[in-house]
């Protein structure tokens, strides 16, 4: 569209629990607007937004996909987001690019865990939002029951603007409570024919219209005064009042339709254009001037200083890196040198473009408020701020959930270690919710993510994009060892060879420290029985000995070591000799100081529907968990517990099984605790067996 203004742009995220029909709705919206000429289906694997081969195989979205269309002098940027809870990071990113969202609720399944969890994300960012009750053509669906569930979960500000005409297979349209007209849907085209309201629905329509009027007027003092005085509210006043109420989060409108039959898409597009805010209507964006560290308020103005946020990165083995961005101020044009203020590097933009699924359309400019993309930027990745070098601005970073599930990554073919490392680095650029690190304590490369599906999808993308085939295995638990008693121990290293020999001799006092204190070293030598220059070697010997404990070879923690006596030889003593002597003393002392095995304990927060709470608590108890508390958040129960990491390695799968996919959890390290004796014996026995096998 030539001469597009920011006022004509609408940025909308489609959000829901898995299976509510976002991708089918997005396909219908694209088709109805004329952006595509053929209506694809998720089952056939030919939709615009689920173009990734893994998405086609799984028949669900795994990433946030930008889609643009034009409708009645407006450009609408849709973002089709994943419904799987494992991919909530994609939603967190997408929410930084939109000024509105529609939450889909299946009339079959109703409000689900994901619906409530994603709602909290929208609420946190004060994003104007509405609901689209989908699948009203299916059997055993009930609009009023679903509406009641939504109202119960999200409050009295949930107000229907549509009333369905017909039910299940006979669903044929809606009553528009704003126009007080019946909209009869033309199946597949997405359009509708406006007619009079059926006689049998007039009473209910009038009643719901009155509720709509009350909700809108309550958010505007002038309209409320007029309403209470019994004066008529004009259609224009109602329209302006509803726009204001949606923008301020005082009304959450409810629309209805059937995505797979493309019923209701034109009505939804009309509603987005007429009632949802443009980027101009949101609060000013806060940025930091890195030169002064002062906060700056940015207006969404195409003539303002350039400020763009990269909210998504896609790694393409052929095109290279694609950065999807939201321009918050200024205008992005081709052949521009830009400044990445996050990395403090200059980058060159050749040709910006717009994205619709896997297709790209060159852009002469991307104005403030619009969503575009650029490719082949060397240093830029998700979360980075782009601006001009002489007007540097840093935008607030995107907040992501922490990974909850980890797996060890092993190459299927020997010699692929370097390829794996490079591929994982590229995947981290594409997805900030995964973490990769080398656990030197257990000798494994660890890939962490938000769930089993998340890790599997990451590995599948690595294979497809970079030709790297890996195996995922449960990671080894990083146990530790410590002591429960104070002991004194002697270490003497004496070796005589031709010429100078080796002599080191020290006495150590080894005592336990409070959990979490780590390691302390104290020099109590008096009278020079060990010369000062050898004390660091004594400490170094202890530290090296701590790397492998006496029980199962795990690192020793929470100990204090004091060197209090010893002897030296004026010729044969050396740093090496004292290092070996202190190592011998430490190992001997730890073995006598009642050594015990420690395990990492995780703070776990589980969100589940109330119906599953008993089963989840029972399962956590069976995993040696301690339940710390429970609280209700909406229709969801939040269970807080502390559980040993060893019991949580497959919890993502366990929770899915227990809750039929309706549970979600977060987990972070809390502290170390002593392993129960019976379990510790098994761990020690296994470690000793592995040590013997290595020798063979």
Image (cartoon, rainbow, N blue to C red):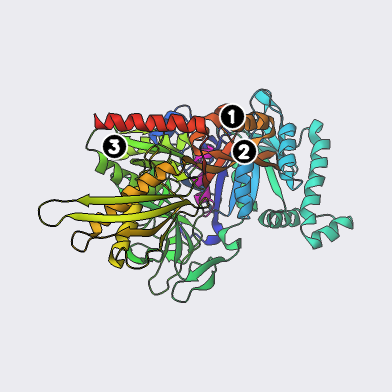
Q: Which mark is residue 551?
A: none
Q: Secondary structure at mark 1?
A: helix
Q: Residue at x 60, y 55 (%)?
A: 125
Residue that sits furthest to the right in the current view: 229
Gap in Å between the C-alphas at discs 2 and 1? Answer: 10 Å
Coordinates of residue 487 in the picture (x, y in percent): 44, 49
Q: Residue at x 29, y 37 (%)?
A: 468
Residue 663 location, quadrant: top right
Q: Which residues are magenta?
A: 80-97
Q: Secondary structure at mark 3?
A: loop
Q: How many badges with numbers are in the image? A: 3
Q: Are marks 2 and 1 in contact (CB under 8 Å)?
A: no
Coordinates of residue 48 in the picture (x, y in percent): 44, 38
Question: Mark 3 vs mark 1: which is more N-terminal?
Answer: 3
Q: Secondary structure at mark 2?
A: strand
Gap in Å between the C-alphas at discs 3 and 1? Answer: 38 Å
Comparing 591 with 632, the one in front is 591
Coordinates of residue 689 in the picture (x, y in percent): 34, 29
**Quadrant in which the C terminus appears:** top left
Q: Are marks 3 and 1 in contact (CB under 8 Å)?
A: no
Q: Which residue is mark 1?
A: 622
Give the crowd class for mark 2: few <14, some 14-19, many >=20 residues within 10 Å.
some
Gap in Å between the C-alphas at discs 2 and 3? Answer: 40 Å
Question: Mark 2 vs mark 3: which is more N-terminal?
Answer: 3
Give the crowd class for mark 3: few <14, some 14-19, many >=20 residues within 10 Å.
many
Q: Residue at x 51, y 60 (%)?
A: 369
Q: Are marks 2 and 3 in contact (CB under 8 Å)?
A: no
Q: Which mark is residue 468?
A: 3
Q: Which residue is mark 2?
A: 626
Q: Is residue 623 above or below residue 442?
A: above
Is residue 82 rendered magenta in the image?
A: yes
Comparing 606 with 497, the one in front is 497
């Amino acid at each position: 569209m030539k001469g597009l203004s920011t006022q004509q742009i609408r940025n909308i995220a489609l959000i829901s629990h898995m299976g509510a029909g976002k991708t089918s709705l997005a396909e219908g919206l694209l088709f109805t607007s004329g952006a595509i000429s053929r209506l694809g289906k998720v089952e056939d694997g030919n939709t615009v937004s689920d173009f990734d081969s893994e998405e086609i195989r799984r028949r669900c979205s795994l990433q946030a996909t930008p889609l643009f269309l034009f409708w009645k002098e407006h450009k609408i940027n849709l973002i089709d987001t994943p419904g799987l809870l494992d991919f909530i990071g994609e939603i967190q990113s997408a929410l930084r690019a939109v000024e509105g969202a529609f939450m889909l609720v299946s009339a079959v399944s109703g409000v689900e865990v994901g619906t409530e969890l994603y709602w909290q994300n929208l609420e946190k960012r004060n994003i104007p939002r509405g609901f689209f009750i989908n699948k009203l053509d299916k059997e055993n669906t009930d609009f009023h029951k679903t509406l009641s569930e939504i109202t119960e979960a999200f409050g009295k500000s949930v107000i229907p603007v549509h009333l369905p005409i017909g039910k299940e297979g006979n669903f044929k349209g809606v009553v528009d409570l704003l126009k007080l007209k019946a909209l009869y849907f033309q199946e597949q085209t997405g359009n509708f024919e406006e007619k009079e309201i059926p006689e049998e629905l007039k009473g209910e329509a009038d009643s719901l219209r009155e509720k709509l009027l009350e909700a809108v007027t309550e958010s505007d003092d002038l309209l409320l005064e007029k309403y209470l005085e019994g004066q008529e509210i004009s259609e224009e006043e109602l329209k302006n009042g509803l726009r204001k109420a949606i923008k301020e989060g005082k009304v959450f409108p409810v629309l209805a339709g059937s995505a797979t039959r493309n019923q209701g898409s034109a009505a939804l597009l009309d509603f987005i254009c007429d009632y949802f805010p443009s980027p101009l209507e949101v609060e000013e964006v806060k940025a930091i001037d890195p030169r002064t560290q002062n906060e700056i308020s940015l207006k969404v103005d195409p003539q303002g200083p350039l400020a763009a946020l990269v909210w998504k990165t896609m790694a393409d083995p052929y095109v290279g890196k694609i950065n999807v961005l939201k321009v918050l101020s200024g205008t992005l044009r081709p052949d521009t040198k830009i400044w990445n203020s996050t990395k403090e590097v200059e980058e060159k933009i050749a040709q910006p473009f717009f994205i619709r699924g896997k297709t790209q359309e060159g852009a002469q400019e991307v104005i403030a408020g619009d969503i575009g993309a650029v490719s082949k930027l060397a240093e830029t990745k998700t979360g980075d701020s782009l601006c001009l070098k002489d007007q540097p601005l840093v935008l607030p970073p995107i907040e992501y959930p922490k990974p909850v599930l980890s797996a060890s990554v092993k190459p299927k073919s020997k010699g692929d270690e370097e390829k794996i490392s490079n591929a994982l680095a590229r995947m981290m650029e594409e997805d900030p919710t995964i973490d990769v690190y080398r656990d030197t304590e257990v000798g494994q490369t660890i890939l962490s993510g938000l769930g089993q599906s998340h890790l599997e999808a990451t590995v599948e993308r690595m294979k497809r994009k970079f030709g790297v085939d890996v195996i995922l295995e449960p990671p080894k638990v990083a146990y530790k060892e410590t002591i429960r008693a104070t002991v004194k121990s002697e270490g003497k290293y004496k070796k005589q060879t031709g010429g100078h020999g080796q002599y080191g001799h020290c006495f150590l006092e080894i005592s336990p420290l409070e959990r979490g204190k780590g390691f302390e070293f104290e020099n109590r030598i008096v009278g020079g029985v060990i010369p000062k220059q050898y004390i660091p070697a004594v400490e170094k010997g202890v530290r090296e000995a701590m790397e492998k404990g006496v029980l199962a070879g795990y690192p020793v923690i929470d100990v204090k070591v004091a060197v209090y006596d010893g002897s030296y030889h004026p010729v044969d003593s050396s740093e090496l000799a004292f290092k070996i002597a202190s190592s011998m003393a430490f190992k001997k002392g730890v073995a006598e100081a009642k050594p015990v095995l420690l395990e990492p304990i995780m703070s776990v927060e589980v969100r589940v529907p109330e119906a599953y709470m008993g089963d989840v608590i029972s399962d956590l108890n069976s995993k040696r968990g301690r339940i710390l508390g429970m609280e209700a958040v909406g229709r969801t129960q939040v269970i807080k517990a502390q559980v040993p990491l060893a019991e949580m390695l497959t919890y993502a799968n366990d929770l899915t099984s227990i809750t039929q996919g309706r549970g979600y959890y977060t987990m972070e390290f809390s502290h170390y605790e002593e392993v129960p004796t019976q379990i510790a014996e098994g761990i020690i026995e296994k470690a000793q067996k592995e040590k013997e096998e290595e020798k063979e």
